[in-house]
Image (cartoon, helix red, strand yellow):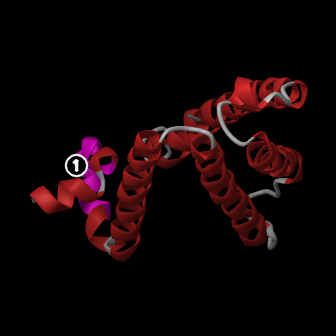
Amino acid sequence: MGVIVARYVKPFADPAWFYAHITLQIVGYAMGVAGWVTGLNLNDEDATGGDPGKHGAIGGVLFGICTLQMLALFLRPKKEHKLRKVWNLYHYSLAASILILGIINTTASSSGRFGICTTTLLLHQFLSWASSTSLKDLRSCRRLRNGVEHTLGYWWYLAA
């Protein structure tokens, strides 16, 4: 949820999006810690419904990356600082890694249908991101007129 707030609410609610993003990320991290601790206690293959080795290994890596991402809160330079671009690259790269690994880990011990739905959603998000970066100048005017456009992303352009 914190990623959604950062991506879709940021252009419309400048200071509020940041505090909502941080709050949701901290709550999500706390839930992740609870899930990780629970996962450490579940070594029974019947309880997980899949291969606990693969799921547990991805979960451990994911937990480590999430912990690094939480440290970004304390290492964040001011907007004017010369290292802000490096920090942004660090923050966005870890966020993308967390999302991808989280989806892979979720589908690692799930049915095939869930994996297909997840892949479809990822493809939609990628196409939305690709259209927003290539049409940035054109979109800036439209985004101010219609806040819903940013949420609909790529599919809005297909219908237009």
Residue 105 lies within the magenta run:
no
Residue 89 lies, with reference to residue 71, above or below; the image says: below
- State the image coordinates of residue 80 (x, y, percent, origin top left): 74, 65
Q: Who's the residue at 69% across and 64% down the image?
A: 93
Q: Could you tell me what secondary structure mostly forms the magenta stretch?
A: helix
**Where 84 sits versus 17, above or below?**
below
Q: Is residue 63 above or below residue 28?
A: below
Q: Which residues are magenta?
A: 140-150
The residue drawn where x is 11% and y is 56% is 159
Residue 116 at x, y = what percent?
40, 49
| Side of 69 relative to 145 (left or right) | right
Query: Image quadrant of residue 48?
Result: top right
Looking at the picture, does residue 116 appear above or below residue 106?
A: below
Which residue is at 80% across, 73% downward?
82
Going by the image, does 119 lie left or right of 158?
right
User: Pointer 1: what residue?
Assistant: 145
